[in-house]
Image: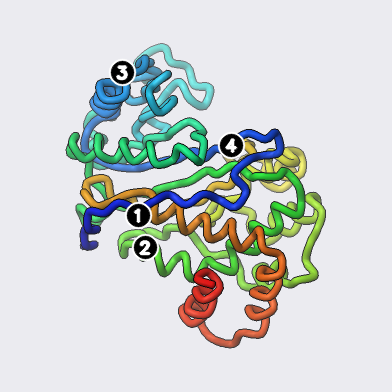
Amino acid sequence: MAQLALPTSIDFLPPPMLHNEQGEVRTVGVEIEFVGPSAEKTVQALQEALGGRLVEADPHSFALKDSAIGELTVELDSRILHPGKGGGNRKGMLPKIAALFGFAASYLVPCELVTAPTPVDRLQELDRILDILRKLGAKGTQDAPFYAFGLHFNPEIPRQDAETLTAFMKSFVLLNSWLRREVSPDRTRDLLGFADPFPVDYVRRIVSPDYWPDIPRFIDDYLAANPTRNRDLDLLPLLHHFDRERVRAVLPNEKINGRPTFHYRLPDARASDPGWSIAPDWNRWVAVERLAADREKLNAAGTTYLGFKGEDKSWANVVEQVVRS
């Protein structure tokens, strides 16, 4: 079982590009999975602490609007339990069955708490949510061998152009071995298959200093190598936002909602841990953004990777020096 983090206070680092193309502070959405308290009890506790207006979509899906930290949704993370989603008919017995099943499933099926897009310079306010979850008795990945809960970030892309998209992707795949080592995925996630790494051939192709495609070519290359959402940096929502028809031509049935954000999936959410903050994971994402913003260092790291002959864990040591420099 994973060790608890020590209580600490960690600053949230700002990204190198704080504003989007409209001059507004960029936003990031956060998703946290946990088990224990029901969605209803959770959203009621959030309302008590943060104010706002509670809206019930069904017995296991709630929204908290106009709270002190913006809109939040809390629901059991299973579409079976939400008959109003997916175009189903809510009449008859299905909602009642879902309600009864949901109360039993709340002990095994995780709840998912999702924030609305939050300005990145207010991200530290979201740690208040963790305190509320802990007081409710929420459980995280470290609390049982079969728990495998995630933390996700959805940071807004700072510039909606091919150069920014490519730079971020280059940076992420170059740093991915280091990111995975630092996050220290729980063994449960290893057993349950958290997310597959990007194929080596694809990584070698895109980290080349000569690889700066336009958006159509980037999308085609990405989909040819990654026709799946099973990646720790899932680009499909962003690529769907850029060119819906191009993505749907390859993945007509995949559940994708287009939005101008990256989808960074982390394998460890420690809701009961008194020392847990989302700051360290956010700060490692900022390291990705910093490398993406430095073209000279990015190209140099790509060249070094192409000449590297060691294993992933050895590359993590090499690229860590890039992060620290």
* Viewer-side residue, 30 vs 70: 70
Mark 1, Cα crowd under 10 Å, few <14 / some 14-19 / many 20+, is many
Residue at the extreme top of the image, as rendered: 91
Find disc 3 in the rendering and name its residue: 96
**Residue at 38%, 37% in the rendered image:** 125
Quarter of the figure that contains the C terminus: bottom right
Under circle 2, the secondary element is loop
Q: How many marks?
A: 4
Find disc 1 in the rendering and name its residue: 268
Say which mark, if any, is on residue 25.
Answer: 4
Amino acid type of disc 2?
Pro
Q: Nearer the viewer, mark 2 or mark 4?
A: 4
Lower position in the chain sequence, tag 1 or tag 4: 4
* Residue 51 position (above or below residue 305): above
Q: CA distance from mark 1 to mark 4?
A: 28 Å
Q: Are marks 2 and 1 in contact (CB under 8 Å)?
A: yes
Q: CA distance from mark 2 to mark 3?
A: 37 Å
Q: In the image, residue 241 lies at what x, y percent?
A: 69, 38
Find disc 2 in the rendering and name its residue: 185
